[in-house]
Image: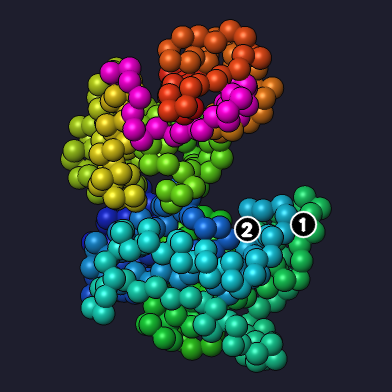
């Protein structure tokens, strides 16, 4: 681990956020002598961010904890273009109205996790549509275009991988890296921003912005990227068989969000506590050293801390209470996902699939055959079984030991 003198880079290093840093020595010196405004950008492609975005939000939180200024950039402009990084297909085009609705829905998560205001280290939120949509095309070509070469742009992974796979890359997407670089330069001019933070797939885009700022204004800018986050099993962080782990409650119930962290691999507990909570490093060392069944206490602590930070303390308390009642008491926790049954009932396969426990009726049929499906803790053996309840009645449908839902008549 590299030794840094600034509290910012020490914090990021100790917690495991650093993959690459541009001119680490100069950034370390700068962070040690002044407030460094730094930004991370989030495109508004959906009405919620997901767990894959959480490490970047935590970077902004750590920046503020170390005495610096977080700038949250909502990509109202860049969402209209689409970042090709790590993707084989072009992004679906969204209307201005949908993008604005998505930004409004995403905003509350940042309000919970950062302190906003007018002070020197208070967070601010800006929308890059403010400057990108007013940027004239000829102006962009004349002022910014000369600082980019096609030769160099073709070497970046976001472009090279798409071309290597013989997938189409539109001229629209090809311009994304230019617009992101222009974002950094604009933020440097307007807010004194000196640092851009992002995932490892953003390295090329960040370097472009640093070079553009130096060439156009002579400003020294810096970048920090985080490692590609995968679970101990090698799976991409934030993805489950049921889909993305959304940060917003309307797309994922509190209980399911809590359970995602509670069910993490034993080997991931310490790393996730460092990355996604404010628990002290000393306490984390104690928690990750637990063995056997005791490691579950560390997982519950992880689930409570992350849920409280992202969803609020009450959400964490309710989710833990539901888990305790469901697993320990054998009851029906109030925070479990629910499914209202139609008057004529519903097949067990359809119920499992509609709840998102299985991807298809075929998978549901296999799970029934494996003896993994229970209704009120009694095994269901017939994949064609219908579940019907009297009006007002409830039952618990379970898949394995970790997936439970309330069925309502």
> Marks 2 and 1: which is nearer the front?
2
In the image, 153 versus 378, the foreground residue is 378
Q: Residues within 10 Å of mark 1 (few under 14, many from 20)?
A: some
Q: Which residue is mark 1?
A: 163
Q: Tag on residue 233? A: none
| Residue positioned 33% across, 17% down in the render | 330
In the image, 376 versus 371, the foreground residue is 376
What element does badge 1 sit on? helix
Give how far across and how far down residue 184 sits, in percent.
49, 76
Give how far across and how far down residue 208 sits, in percent.
57, 72
| Residue positioned 24% across, 61% down in the render | 65
Give how far across and how far down residue 13 sits, in percent.
32, 52
| Residue positioned 65% across, 66% down in the render | 94
Give the image quarter of residue 79.
Answer: bottom right
Q: Residues within 10 Å of mark 2 (few under 14, many from 20)?
A: many
Which residues, given as a range, are shown in magenta? 328-353
35 in the magenta segment? no
């Amino acid at each position: 681990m590299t030794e840094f003198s600034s509290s910012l880079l020490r914090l990021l290093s100790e917690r495991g956020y650093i993959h690459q840093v541009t001119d680490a020595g100069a950034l370390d010196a700068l962070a040690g002598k002044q407030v460094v405004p730094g930004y991370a950008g989030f495109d508004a492609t959906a009405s919620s961010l997901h767990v894959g975005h959480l490490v970047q939000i935590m970077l902004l939180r750590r920046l503020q904890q170390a005495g610096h200024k977080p700038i949250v950039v909502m990509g109202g402009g860049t969402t209209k273009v689409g970042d090709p990084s790590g993707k084989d297909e072009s992004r679906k085009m969204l209307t201005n109205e949908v993008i604005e609705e998505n930004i409004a829905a995403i905003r509350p998560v940042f309000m919970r996790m950062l302190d906003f205001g007018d002070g020197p280290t208070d967070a601010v939120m800006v929308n890059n549509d403010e400057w990108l949509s007013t940027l004239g095309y000829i102006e962009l070509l004349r002022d910014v275009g000369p600082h980019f070469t096609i030769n160099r742009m073709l070497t970046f992974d976001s472009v090279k991988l798409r071309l290597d796979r013989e997938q189409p890359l539109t001229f629209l997407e090809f311009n994304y890296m230019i617009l992101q670089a222009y974002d950094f330069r604009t933020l440097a001019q307007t807010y004194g921003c000196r640092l851009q933070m992002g995932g490892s797939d953003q390295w090329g885009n960040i370097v472009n912005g640093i070079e553009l700022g130096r060439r156009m204004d002579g400003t020294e800018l810096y970048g920090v990227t985080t490692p590609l986050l995968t679970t101990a099993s090698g799976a991409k962080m934030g993805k489950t068989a049921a889909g993305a782990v959304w940060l917003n409650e309307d797309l994922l119930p509190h209980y399911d969000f809590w359970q995602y962290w509670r069910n993490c691999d034993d080997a991931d507990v310490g790393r996730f506590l460092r990355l996604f909570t404010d628990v002290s490093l000393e306490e984390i060392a104690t928690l990750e050293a637990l063995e056997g069944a005791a490691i579950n206490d560390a997982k519950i602590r992880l689930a409570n801390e992350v849920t409280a930070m992202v969803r609020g303390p009450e959400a964490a308390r309710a989710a833990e209470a539901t888990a305790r009642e469901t697993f320990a008491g054998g009851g029906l926790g109030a925070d479990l996902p629910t499914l209202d049954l139609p008057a004529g009932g519903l097949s067990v396969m359809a119920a499992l699939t509609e709840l998102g426990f299985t991807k298809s009726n075929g998978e549901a049929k296999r799970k029934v055959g494996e003896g993994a499906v229970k209704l009120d803790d009694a095994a269901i053996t017939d994949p064609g079984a219908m579940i019907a309840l009297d009006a007002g009645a409830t039952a618990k449908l379970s898949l394995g030991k970790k997936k439970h839902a309330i069925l309502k008549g």
